[in-house]
Image (cartoon, rainbow, N blue to C red):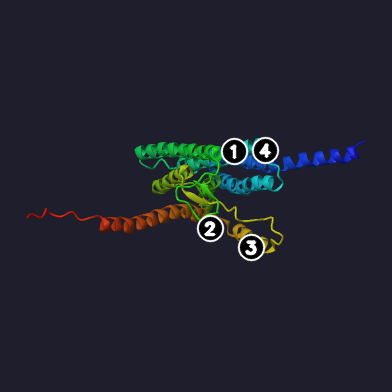
Amino acid sequence: MNGRDPALADAKARLRRGMYLLPSLFTVGNIAAGYFSISETIKAISDVGNAHTHLDWAAIAIIFAIPFDALDGRIARMTNTTSDFGKELDSLADAITFGMAPSLLALIWGFHFLPDSVNPQLLEHLRQAGAFICFLFLIGGVSRLARFNISHDAQPRNPGRPGRKYFVGMPIPAAAGLLAATVHLCYGYPVLAWWIAIPWLVLVGLSGFLMVSTWRFWSGKEINFSRSHPFQLLLVLAIVFYIIFRFSQGVLFSLALLYMFSGIWARAAYGWTRRRRRRPAKVAVEDAAPVEPDSLSRS
């Protein structure tokens, strides 16, 4: 006898398997939200009278999936139950919920309901351009996921503070959240004016570009939920969640827009700083360069 209780060992093994299942449940919730969003977007096409309701629910489902995506990986790391299966499942879930679902939502909400009163040629160009840009958003999203999976300790082109971790490129949940928050800001009412469809086209294209860029974005990994006294943090989060729930349209759109511009500002500020540093160095080199005499002295 080795002194070990077989029943106790079996119970621990079952508990361990259950711990591995827990992060995957959040990932499945992520997939369910994406599936619901796609189905609601499709319903909006046939149920024109209630299209805004379906589109709003589709946007809310994408926003609701973001906490699921953030929690599955964090729980896996906290419980030491990370696995290759979980990583692959999470990537596939993100491709559905934050890639396919928002690209379809952006296409239907921004271009499908444009009225026939718009110039037919302009209407055709807008719809074709919308379909192409929304497809590029999807390609940018899955490319961002693929790069994240194969990158090890990737560094942004504009490094931040030493010791801090940043995302290289805009995360796909943030890009999807920006599109969904915009739809939710309008209560799901689709675009009916061509001059609104044009900036929407730019926003979708910019989101796709930022995902495949190498610019730094805040990762939020400095937030530590495993501290011994997280009461202050939990209190702040409770207040934030209440404000988001109470004023979801304006708050979610503002947060998404602020996050997007934070990455753009960080890249612009880094470029300005580098140019300022180069100018004094260039001036110093020019001042230190030897001056050749105009002519040789002759005796």
Is mark 3 in CB contact (under 8 Å) with mark 2? no
**Residue 292 left/right relative to 181:** left
Q: Earlier in the sequence, mark 4 or mark 2?
A: 4
Residue neighbourhood size for the residue with mark 4, other residues' Cα within 10 Å, grouped as few (<14), some (14–19), many (≥20): few
Kind of residue sitting beneath label 1: Ser
Residue corresponding to mark 3 = 236
Q: Marks 4 and 2, how far apart in space? A: 38 Å
**Along the line of sight, which residue is nearer the eye, 242 or 54?**
242
Kind of residue sitting beneath label 4: Ser
Residue neighbourhood size for the residue with mark 1, other residues' Cα within 10 Å, grouped as few (<14), some (14–19), many (≥20): some
**Along the line of sight, which residue is nearer the eye, 37 or 53?**
37
* Horizontal and vertical percent position of residue 19: 75, 43
Q: Secondary structure at mark 1?
A: helix
- In the drawing, what numbered circle is on residue 83? 4
On the question of residue 291 being in view, the answer is: yes
Task: From this view, report whether residue 161 is shown above or below residue 32.
Answer: below
Residue corresponding to mark 1 = 91
Residue corresponding to mark 2 = 250
**Residue 6 left/right relative to 239:** right
Q: Earlier in the sequence, mark 3 or mark 4?
A: 4
Is mark 2 in CB contact (under 8 Å) with mark 1? no
The image quarter containing residue 100 is top right
Kind of residue sitting beneath label 2: Gly
The image quarter containing residue 231 is bottom right
Disc 4 versus disc 1: nearer the observer: 4
The structure residue drawn at horizontal position 35% and vertical position 58%, both measured from the top left corner, is 276
